[in-house]
Amino acid sequence: MKRTGKCLRKASVFLLMLTLIISALPNRMQVFAESFDYATALKYAIEFYDANKCGKEAVDDNVFEWRKGPCHITDGVDVGLDLTGGYHDAGDHVKFGLPQGYAASVLGWSIYEFRDVFDATGNTEKMLSQLKYFTDYFLRCHPNPTTFYYQLGDGIIDHQYWGAPELQTGDRPALYVANPSNPATDIVGETVAALALMYLNYKSIDSAYADKCLKAAKELYQLCKASPKIGDYQFFYQSTSMYDDLAWGAIWLYVAEKNEQYMTEAKDYALQKNINQEDPLKNKWTMCWDNMYLAAHLKIAELTGDTTFKTSVQSNLDYWINTLDKTPAGLRVLHYWGVLRYAAAESMVAFLFNRVSPNQKYLDFAQSQMDYILGKNPANMSYEVGFGTKWSSFVHHRAAQGGQGYENNADKTPAKYVLRGALIGGPDKTDTFKESVDEYQYTEVAIDYNAAFVGALAGMAKHFGAQVSIRPTPTPVVTPTSSNQNDYKITGYISPDFSVPSQYAAYIKGGFKVEVKDADVEAITDSNGFFEISGVSGSLSGHTLIISKKNYLKREISKVVVNGNVQLSTSTSPILMWIGDTNGDGAINMSDIMAYALVFNSTSGDGKYKQDLDVNQDGAINMSDIINVAKHFSASVISYS
């Protein structure tokens, strides 16, 4: 009888929820095809920047052992400054200002918008380290409020050298500098955005450093807006616009300080034409080092709801999806040189605009382009080097070539080292790819190529699944290996008690906090649900563990005897947690059901949607989520036992 009564009670609750919810069920359930390991692809794409590090600390925290030592350690000597650091541009060693600022700002934007993805896949620390390597360099290049050095090295001279950067001799000129008479508005505007984003991304980690970045961003903004002018250049990175860059910088200063003047100026700049007098509201390009109108319009639309800018982005995406030339296999072709950087950039835009105006077509488009890059293409190869099982061995990159030779031998000698994580230029409009070091448009890599690629991969991991943990999960052991009675380990696995979709496992299983009660030791589960608590003291009477995560019913496990390393659970038999305690009061009851009723039938991007209430993280709060909550209606903390 008790069992029957319990079932009736749950049924009654379920019916009550249906009466509270007046919206209809979604007409379409999202179906996911077999996908790639996007978490690993993301990890590699971030690590690529190690290969292009420049300066005294180039080999510090560097995953590539073939980067043998410091390089270009006298940068800035001609102007009496230390201008070392930053990143080499592409397969060469010049530090060009425009792609440097673009890459840093877009990478910063990526982690700002997808911080949950970076956290869940274990990529946050490395990403912030790469970003700080950019901003450390920018701060060195900004010795006073009205000065910014933006090109180190002469491109013409540099391109005559083929070899490892640490073996390149001779001093390099600080070729160009921004100042009040030559503000280099395009370059400095991008740098403003990068520094402001570093403030936003880093203030909770090192507030003093973050404040330093914000101060520099504000000074540089004043410098580049006073008398706007495009910066100087050689034959490389010839800019056609600057107001887009000013808008981009102003937007992120607005986000950092909530000063409405910045947004007013951003909107004005975002409507100014480029030097070709092209209307930015009819822009067909995606974001790139020479065009940030689309990115600026997207962020303004998100922050203000302004329909002018929202329509601009929507029209651009519709053009890419419906009209832009494409290869027979579906890759969109904006420009023949480095075609994949543009496809990746538009994919990142699609993911972010889907938040502003949710539409499955944006996600489908991004997935088609990114999966093409990762291997779903006629060549059955990954255009991200080192990912998958087949990739190009003829990457145009001096350090990776490893002294294998170049002149008269470009087609015959593959690179000595694997430039893992690099997005190469890609195929032509017929899906044909040319495996040759001297076919730059196909095989060169660059810091601007990978920037939006990182953001797009984060979008893929969020919407289509991280699949596999990028960190090897330790295999717990039970044997008492430590002689120190205060240095044992407790390990195990935790999982929700509902079926976890593989594409969302990283987010659902990650983030559970496991702490030893009355002791200052704890751990957070990784994307496989694995945790390891170190420094646990021995206890024959037993410790009490507390497991918690937002919206889950807290669980206590008592009398955990510790006289050696302890394994509490396995991946096949994990500790189960119950979803539904939205207010953290230790019970799953009607107040929690009401919280779900208020956001029922919402999807990612609309105002009602709350990601932390999306039980299965599929981008929609619907009946499948409610059923998982109803399973343990009326449960409290003691119900676990």
Image (spheres, rainbow, N blue to C red):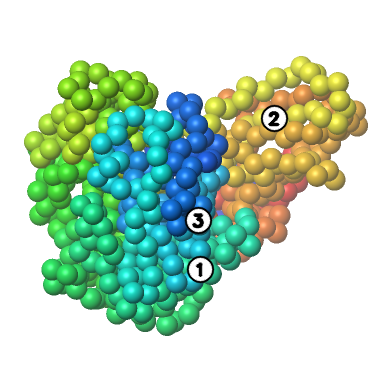
Q: Is residue 123 visible?
A: no
Q: Secondary structure at mark 1?
A: loop
The first of marks 2 and 1 along the sequence is 1
Q: Amino acid type of disc 2?
A: Thr
Q: Nearer the viewer, residue 186 or 12?
A: 186
On residue 144, the disc is 1
Give the CA separation, mark 2 to mark 1. 52 Å
Q: Amino acid type of disc 3?
A: Leu
Judging by the rendered image, the residue that carries numbered circle 2 is 491
Q: Quadrant of residue 167?
A: top left
On residue 81, the disc is 3
Q: Nearer the viewer, residue 253 or 375?
A: 253
**Label 2 crowd (10 A; few <14 / some 14-19 / many >=20):** many
**Left or right: residue 407 compared with residue 568:** left
Q: Nearer the viewer, mark 1 or mark 3?
A: 3
- Residue drawn at x 12%, y 31% is 432
Q: Secondary structure at mark 3?
A: loop
Q: Dividing the image into 4 quarters, which one contains the C terminus?
A: top right
Q: Secondary structure at mark 2?
A: strand
Q: Nearer the viewer, mark 2 or mark 1?
A: 1
